Image (cartoon, coloured by chain):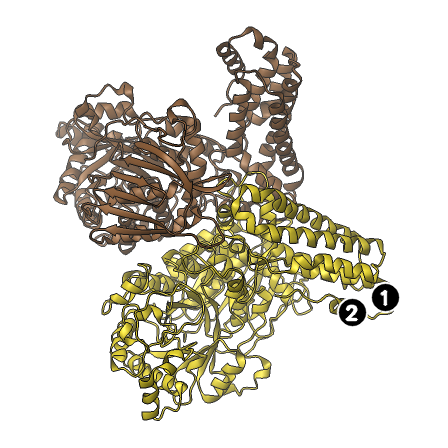
Chain colours: A yellow, B brown
């Protein structure tokens, strides 16, 4: 197990006078996740094609990574004319086994000089990580591409750095998983957790029980040959594949073909809705364990990873409570209650998995002192639950805080920590916290937009899990996130590239038609509603209804709106008072955006029926821009808004903050409220400390309901 | 072998009064390739999710295609609210073998009604084609999506409808081939020809001779496991994989590991330049046939297709002429000349392949009456060569005219016909012409932009090879090409989606930076130079130099420039004389484009070194727009340009037509020249017939040098 102590980022300039990252200045590197230790020595104009050689024995995994890296390096050099190649020598220790296990030494050191670079790593996995760091080093500056010269010594904080993809609720085929594996490797994530079964689908072929996927999947599942290919694809990128088979709850797709194993009589059909449902396996029948024994033993042979996830979450107890035989079983076996029965069930699973040489992983609900201590807790509840588990001696990983399906901003996922300083764990207990994983639940994603839900925000999670705990500067994270976003695209992610495809769902093939530029602006300035709110706004949606609306085209975090909010924050709370030229420039942006909103609201919905639902948010955008413009003019002129005016403008703005049937929201509402509050209060600015001024403005402008 | 008679498109309206395609009106279908027979019966607002059932036995290939079709159908329905599913029933005859052979019946009939559709096909391959047709039927109209109701009876004109990808010159990995197979299936292409070896790379693993790819490929080759996976991937889409191993010429990568088999002493290294090179296998040594025997027998087992392509092109004769032993061999064996020696070599290959049950395919140069008649000619020379071969009794396919790497407009590839009416072949001779293939030679493409070179233009080739010979309306082809382009993107092609990635090579990650919108406009209005001109303009380029310049970002055919040229043509040659409002509108476009050109030329190259080469074409664009604006104003005002003015403006325009170091050209120059000529001649319009007027204008405005 690699060391997991915290290393302070150590950035100093030996030669070139570069600023330290610790003082708030941008890190002089664009690399994400930030390396543990960096010593900068200068920079050089970017050299030509990358040519890599390996000192020592060959390793097909490293050879393949080198070939991909050489190709991707091409975007770091300029067009026109031949340039001398840039040579990298890799010195690698042990190759490590072809299938990663999570216990390899993943560290590396990278010496980047003007003439060439040297990468040293004890294993191939470390060498893969070092290659990704090198690929992220070149920067585009005013004068062209440049390569920072540096000595980098790097290693992960946690050994389990995961991304879970739910392929059950909306089916995600091979290519989706493959391109996300490519993107994971860029940011040094090393565990692909596949949520393979749930109420809405059974997505893996069983040879002993073909009826499971046969009847439980609409024909949409991975064959075993495909899964073997995926595991090999992941292994080539240093990534483990951990499968999840969710039992005893979330089990509707199991009992479609085996109604006799449900806790209440069937028949059952594949669930099409979203939520927590009643069908649960019957843990009192030996036939249940016969099926699970066949199936899990087969899966233990198919998946080389030591860990198998058996879910265990959200059994609502309805079927167990309603079945007298099950309640009698609890009494007869002294199991106390449903939780005791769940523990009994898990002990039976544990025995099956142990025979296959596997360790059992489950969600929080499996935590029970009766379970053997080599079970692992995957916590959707939070670091507190993880600390409790560690106290009991269980290993754990953190999913809470990393629920990227909820469409919160990257910053919300960046700061949660599997081992917060407040956890108060001993060193031995800390060692039980293996890491964490971003979870891509799939109620509201298709293969067309899933990448835009995962990337680039998951790079922020990757930094949390790889980099030292002290790396927590949010603006600096956003600066690098924009850059790594483009690089994830080069590696294969379609999070940006599928934007037009989603637009076409709204307006058809002709993206040059009048008004489409305005629609594009609207799409870029709205966000899907957060948390689980969409289900309440679009109650008619289910697994069979296409996801082709405005909320599906919008990104979880609007980048122009985020940048506008950041600019407003800087302007309002700058030490020197408000810069009026800045206010005028922000007003210009709002003017353009508002005009786009008006055009969509007034002219587009008649032509494009799919845009009827976009009228309300388009009007809301126009409103927010108009009110924001009023506030900016008042600030630029130094004329405070009266109290009545403030109330009037806030009232005018209110519809922009209301839920609308497209299930999108307008993130500009929050900075516009700040602008209004500041415009009203500007007469008091001189009499207040900076701190008091900020607090006054922020408290006058409540954040919009999420 | 399916029927290959010509069927006239038969479009008539039983109920809805739709116009016939024959009269020049747009076909009331967006399907490409156009089906053989269509009877339209009306249309219905597009229904909900597609749900497919199969009458009769299951077939994994059809099941997989149905699953993909159901997902892709989602883009044909509107957002918001639940809609009743649209049900398709497939009635299939024989499943046909799991690996397509090229001799199956690929026909189908499709009855599309308001309540549901029925697809009948004698084989699974026909059913796959019918599914693709159904996916292309829904149209986006003012009132929303609608589904044309029709009875379609369709079958291919030719059984061999191919796309060749050269993976030797620039390596193209698995994912490139896979997404192009996805796109081929959309337009009913059925042969993927992989050009696996050439001077610049040996791209297939041999187990009997691992040194071939080992030393000849920089580690960039398909393993046999990967190739098996590709063949399976293709077969699921009804596509054959025909491998090419190019011998005896284009063989440098063979003799890197086997210098003893070259016709002159080595050593040799992988060729990095483009062109025709000297290294050729020595056909007089038995060791050559021992190696080819091992290798080709191994390949015959790996590739299930009955055809193996052995190249045979462009042996420049230098090595054979210089080697006295080889010339003595020719004399001693009575072979007459090098051509006779090539025929001897091919007969030896024929014997090796026949043992493996394979038919030999080669380029024009293999054609020799001494060869057995079951060899196949792949013609880069043209339909005349193909007719000659057919007259001798050889089967043939046409590549000439379909060289998509040369960056000509889609119309240039649309009209060449493997069986032109002028060929004068008997029915029996016509049956020897199996079809054709688009060829993607890879001197100037990388995995990043190869899709944009192949698609959407190859859809025009696909229509030539599938649809009746009478389908030749160029504007109607372009109308549908824009729509099928979007659908190819939905299926996986990155021809549009990689545009931003190519822009980033020029300006880095921040595509929101000032001026980038103008650069985007420039990129959309230039084209790579045509034919083989690029090599002369960028002599320093070779396999190791990245392709990240303006020419690489530009598309082979500028769609806005094409539309501008079409609008100019309509305006100048309209029956009613010149529409002045139209002239003003065209002037508006030129004004915006010219401003973009000026901004790039004047302000961008200082910031972005990669744009230095873009200054000349950016200035050229600004020039063409300015001169075009002058001409349009003269036309709008009805004031003819004087003879001196015409010469002056033509002179002013000249630099825009000159070659520049970015290896791009400005397609607007041609319509601007037409505008100038018309502006000068407009005083004569009234005295000329329509025909004379067109001829006058066109002859005054020479097309720019290509």
Asked whether the viewer can see residue B679, the reply is yes
Q: Residue B60: where, in percent of width, then height?
A: 25, 54
Q: Residue B340's x, y, as percent?
A: 18, 28
Kindly check if marks 1 and 2 are in contact, taking CB atoms under 8 A apart as contact: yes
Label 1, residues with CA under 10 Å away: few <14, some 14-19, many ≥20? few
Q: Secondary structure at mark 2?
A: helix
Q: Nearer the viewer, residue B487 or B513?
A: B487
Q: Do badges 1 and 2 share one subunit?
A: yes
Q: Residue at x 56, y 48 (%)?
A: A612
The chain carrying label 2 is: A
Q: Quadrant of the N terminus of chain A?
A: bottom left
Residue at mark 1 to residue at mark 2: CA–CA distance: 10 Å
Q: Nearer the viewer, residue B695 or B452?
A: B695
Secondary-structure class at tag 1: helix
Instruction: Identify the residue position indicated by label 2 in the image.
Output: A696
Q: Would you identify the image quadrant in which residue B644 lies? A: top right
Quadrant where the image shows the C terminus of chain A: bottom right
């Amino acid at each position: 197990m690699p060391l997991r102590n915290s290393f302070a980022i150590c950035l100093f300039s030996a030669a070139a006078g570069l600023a330290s990252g610790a003082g708030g200045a941008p890190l002089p590197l664009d690399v994400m996740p930030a390396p543990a230790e960096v010593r900068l020595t200068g920079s050089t104009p970017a050299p030509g094609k990358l040519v890599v050689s390996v000192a020592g024995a060959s390793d097909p995994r490293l050879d393949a990574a080198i070939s991909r890296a050489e190709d991707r390096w091409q975007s770091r050099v300029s067009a026109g004319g031949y340039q001398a190649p840039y040579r990298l020598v890799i010195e690698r220790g042990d190759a490590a086994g072809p299938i990663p296990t999570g216990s390899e030494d993943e560290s590396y050191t990278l010496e980047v000089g003007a003439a060439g670079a040297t990468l040293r790593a004890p294993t191939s996995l470390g060498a893969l990580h070092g290659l990704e760091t090198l690929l992220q080093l070149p920067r585009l500056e005013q004068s062209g591409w440049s390569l920072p010269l540096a000595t980098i010594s790097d290693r992960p904080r946690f050994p389990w750095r995961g991304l879970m993809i739910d392929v059950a609720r909306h089916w995600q085929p091979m290519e989706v998983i493959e391109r996300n594996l490519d993107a994971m490797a860029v940011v040094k994530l090393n565990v692909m957790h596949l949520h393979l079964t749930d109420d809405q689908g059974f997505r893996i072929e069983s040879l002993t029980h073909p009826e499971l996927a046969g009847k439980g999947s609409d024909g949409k599942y991975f064959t075993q040959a495909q899964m073997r290919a995926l595991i090999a694809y992941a292994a080539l990128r240093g990534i483990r594949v951990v499968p999840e088979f969710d039992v005893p709850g979330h089990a509707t797709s199991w009992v479609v073909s085996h109604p006799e194993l449900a806790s209440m009589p069937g028949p059952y059909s594949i669930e099409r809705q979203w939520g927590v449902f009643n069908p649960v396996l019957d843990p009192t029948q030996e036939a249940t364990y016969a099926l699970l024994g066949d199936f899990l033993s087969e899966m233990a042979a198919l998946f080389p990873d030591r860990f198998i996830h058996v879910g265990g979450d959200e059994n609502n107890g309805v079927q167990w409570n309603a079945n007298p035989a099950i309640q009698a079983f609890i009494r007869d076996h002294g199991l106390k209650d449903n939780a005791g029965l769940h523990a009994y069930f898990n002990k039976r699973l544990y025995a099956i998995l142990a025979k296959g040489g596997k360790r059992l992983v489950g969600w929080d609900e499996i935590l029970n002192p009766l379970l053997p201590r080599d079970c692992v807790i995957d916590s959707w509840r939070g670091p507190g639950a993880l600390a409790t588990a560690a106290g009991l001696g269980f290993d754990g990983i953190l999913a809470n805080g990393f629920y990227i399906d909820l469409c919160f901003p990257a910053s919300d996922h960046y700061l949660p920590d599997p081992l917060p300083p407040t956890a108060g764990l001993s060193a031995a207990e800390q060692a039980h916290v293996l890491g964490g994983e971003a979870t891509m639940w799939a109620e509201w994603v298709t293969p067309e937009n899933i990448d835009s839900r995962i990337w680039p925000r998951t790079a922020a999670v990757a930094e949390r899990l790889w980099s030292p705990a002290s790396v927590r500067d949010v603006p600096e994270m956003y600066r690098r996130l924009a850059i790594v976003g483009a690089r994830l695209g080069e590696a294969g992610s379609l999070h940006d590239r599928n934007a037009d495809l989603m637009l076409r769902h709204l307006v058809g093939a002709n993206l040059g038609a009048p008004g489409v530029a305005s629609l594009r602006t609207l799409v870029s300035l709205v966000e899907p509603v957060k948390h689980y709110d969409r289900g309440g706004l679009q109650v008619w949606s289910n697994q069979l209804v296409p996801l082709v609306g405005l909320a599906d085209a919008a990104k979880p975090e609007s980048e122009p709106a985020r940048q506008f909010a950041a600019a407003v924050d800087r302007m309002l709370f700058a030490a020197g008072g408000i810069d009026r030229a800045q206010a005028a420039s922000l007003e210009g942006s709002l003017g353009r955006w508002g005009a786009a909103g008006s055009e969509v609201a007034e002219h587009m919905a008649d032509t494009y029926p799919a845009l009827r639902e976009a009228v309300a948010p388009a009007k809301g955008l126009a409103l927010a821009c108009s009110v924001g413009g009023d506030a900016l003019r008042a600030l630029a002129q130094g004329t405070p808004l009266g109290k009545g005016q403030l109330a009037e403008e806030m009232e005018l703005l209110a519809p922009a903050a209301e839920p609308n049937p497209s299930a999108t929201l307008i993130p500009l509402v929050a900075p516009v409220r700040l602008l209004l509050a500041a415009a009203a209060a500007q007469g008091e600015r001189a009499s207040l400390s900076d701190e008091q001024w900020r607090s006054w403005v922020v408290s006058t402008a409540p954040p919009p309901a999420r």
